[in-house]
Image (cartoon, rainbow, N blue to C red):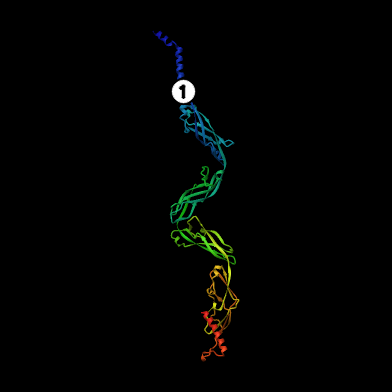
Amino acid sequence: MKEKARKSLFDHMGLKILSIILAVFFWVLIMNLDDFSTTKTIRDIPVTELNGDAIEDLGKVYSVTSGKTVDIIVKGPRSIVDQLTVSDFEAEADLSELSITNSVQINVSLKDSKNSGSIEINYVNNTMNLTIEDIITKELPVKAVITGEPAEGFALGQYKVTPNIVTLSGPQSQIERITEVRAPMDISGIYTTFAKTIPLVAMDAYGESMTDKSIEMSSESVEAAVEICPAKMIPIKITTTGAPAGGYSISSISFNPQVVAVAGPEGKIDSLHAVYVNVSVDEASENVEKNVNIAEFLQEGYYLAEQDQEVAVNILIEKEQTSDLTIKKDDVALIGVSEDLKYELQIPASFKIRLTGLQKDIQNVTTESLQLKLDVTDLEVGEHEPKLTYAVPKNATVTVIGTIKLEVKEKEEQATAEGQPPGSTEQGQTEEGATQSTTEATEAGH
């Protein structure tokens, strides 16, 4: 019985071995069909830069022009490859191995080393390219840039930033592009003085921010102190210095604006009633037209509260004219006459009053408006050349041409008989004429 069983076990041994081989073959085949080899592209793996200080130690600075990320093609079993993402890989570029063309190879590896033997990595492009530059420094002033408007009735006063100069350091191509460092401040709706820390912004010539991390500033921020003051509208007054060229005068002055918003310390602004802007007309023979900075004429502690800080001034300069007035005896008043004396005034035909000035200022001047007077107080008997006095017309000059003579005489004793003067009728008539002349002079004096 046992013999029969033994023979049965080893019967058809070849077929049994073949079936075992076929079973293993089909098992492997089925397994491979379920987990076949596949490929997958992994894009934008960030590249870590190693040993960058090797470049910086040479006094240089680098920037990556290409190769900040790398793309790879992964080949391996589907069960592994399908699960791989960017986070499963690390990419590195050793900058100490920089070539003469300023490029370096990128190496990518799988973080999980247990699957590294099953994965094949191929690169789309595994080269990082660099730009190598000198490091330079540059000093620039800090510009406070004010935006917005304070609360109504208030205005921006003085402001300052500390520090007011910063030093920038970085790649030459970047530093040379920077033209300005700004400290932006918004004062919208603010009605009180304030201080705050303001971050600095480096700007290029086109007003674009330069935020490259390779640029270093000696200070990333400044302390800003901003004064906000009460404001009100103040009239502008134009004054002149110097005198126009000979023979010329100021005809009129016009300007715009005529009022300006001024800010000042609370309690002090109310004492300011005008802003006096001075313009020189020295030796001017033609119109003076200029824009003048109002701020230059503000008293200390006051500030302009508006954007427009100039006043446009137009001073009209005209050539002077002359006009001669003929003077008669009746035009001159005698001041300080004595009742015991008589006065005979002699005005030659060549005697004149010459007026010099603009036509509009002298055309209406008359002998009456000049108020011509001779002061005869304490004059003794005899001939005199007294000085003529007059009222000077506004914006005009007066020149006296010639000399007035005045003869002072004692009054003759009049006869008591019949109230007639002594002497003949002819003499009486002469006396009467002299008396009349004296009386006229006296009345003129009064």
Tell which of 231 and 285 is nearer to you.
285
Q: Position of residue 394 (x, y in %)?
A: 53, 69
- Above or below, 146 against 22 in this view is below
Q: Furthest-bottom residue in view?
A: 417
Q: Position of residue 42 (x, y in %)?
A: 49, 32
Tell which of 235 and 419 is nearer to you.
419
| Mark 1 lies on residue | 33
Tell which of 190 and 248 is nearer to you.
248
Quadrant location of residue 350? bottom right
Residue 335 seen: no
Q: Quadrant of the N terminus?
A: top left
Q: Position of residue 195 (x, y in %)?
A: 45, 52
Tell which of 182 and 306 is nearer to you.
306
Relative to 289, 185 lies left or right:
left
Q: Position of residue 14 (x, y in %)?
A: 46, 12
Residue occupying the point 47% across, 60% down: 234
Mark 1 is on which residue type? Leu
- Above or below, 7 against 413 in this view is above
Q: Furthest-left residue in view?
A: 1
